[in-house]
Amino acid sequence: MAHISASVFTSHVPAIGAALDLGKTQEPYWQPLFQGYEFSKHWLREQKPDVIFLVFNDHATAFSLEMIPTFAIGTAAEYAVADEGWGPRPVPKVMGHPELAAHIAQSVIQDDFDLTIVNKMDVDHGLTVPLSLMCGQPEAWPCPVIPFAVNVVQYPVPSGRRCYQLGKAIRKAVESFDQPLNVQIWGTGGMSHQLQGPRAGLINREWDNRFLDRLIAEPEALSQLPHIDYVREAGSEGIELVMWLIARGALSDKPPKVLHRFYHVPASNTAVGHLILENT
Ligand code: DHB
Ligand code: FE
């Protein structure tokens, strides 16, 4: 049977992708940030996951106000890298895992979570920047990826509680897949940031670090946190953090092992948080 071995959490700031693509990782502004992912890149190479289930949000790239799925699972064989206004990033295309994705869709929908099935989707910085941070600049990404898009852009967005419960349903789905696959689940986006309005540039280190503490130690209680707290404390785009609860819910109920924790301010307008949790 397949199993979930670990979860990875990371922010997805688009400027990080540009810094990497333009060869700026050793510049003083960027060096400390990329340094924080050195352990993670080695770890991922050793882990050799068979599939990454990557929870992310689309930023009005594949979707728009014309159609707003709350939860969308990618069941395609491959995904093109999106053009977000400056041409597609020079990164490999993303290979999918249609068999496992279809199995997860079947299981999770029968478990009462209504997913949208997506057979064609260009993937934006929400998905490619986490891959770049964890893999560097490879010729091809190390394994197939199942993109799982969550609406955190246009209200109403799903509650933390629903995201956490969905993670548990995803775990059950993976564990009932009839192939011995090592699956990782990644939760991406966040941490505190607000990109517009009078509070643009808002960063809340204390709140972010408390969020990391609680994500590790008391995810169930954290999942009860209402949206207004995210927005008030972590800024309007801080709401991206509800996606981390999906990945956390997919880990086992036993306390996880904290393999790596990193926090850095700023990257562009955002606080960057990063965790690797392993099932024990
Ligand atoms: C920034 C952060 C984001 O999460 C995003 O989607 C776009 C921009 C930023 O900090 O610049
Ligand atoms: Fe974002």
Image: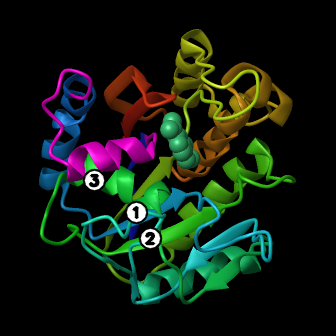
Q: Position of residue 68 (x, y in %)?
A: 77, 70
Q: Which residues are magenta?
A: 10-30
> The N terminus is located in which quarter?
bottom left
Q: Which residue is mark 3?
A: 132
Q: Amino acid at mark 3?
A: Ser
Q: CA distance from mark 2 to mark 1?
A: 6 Å
Of residues 120 and 3, the one nearer the viewer is 120
Q: CA distance from mark 2 to mark 3?
A: 16 Å
The response on whether ligand 1 sits within 8 Å of label 2 is no
Q: Which residue is mark 1?
A: 86
Dot 2 crowding, Cα within 10 Å, few <14, some 14–19, many 20+: some
Residue 189 visible, this angle: no
**Of the two numbered discs 1 and 3 in the rendering, the one whose residue sits closer to the viewer:** 1
Residue 83: mark in rendering = 2
Please identify the quarter of the rendering in which residue 36 is found: top left
Q: Amino acid at mark 2?
A: Asp
Please identify the quarter of the rendering in which residue 170 is found: bottom right
Pointer 2 with pointer 1, Cβ within 8 A: yes
User: Which residue shows up at 48% across the image and 77% down it?
Assistant: 122
Please identify the quarter of the rendering in which residue 145 is found: bottom left
Dot 3 crowding, Cα within 10 Å, few <14, some 14–19, many 20+: many
User: Which residue shows up at 74% across the image and 43% down it?
Assistant: 160
User: Which residue shows up at 46% across the image and 80% down it?
Assistant: 177
> The C terminus is located in which quarter?
top left
Residue 206 visible, this angle: yes
Q: Please tell me whether residue 169 is drawn above or below residue 2 in the rendered image.
A: above
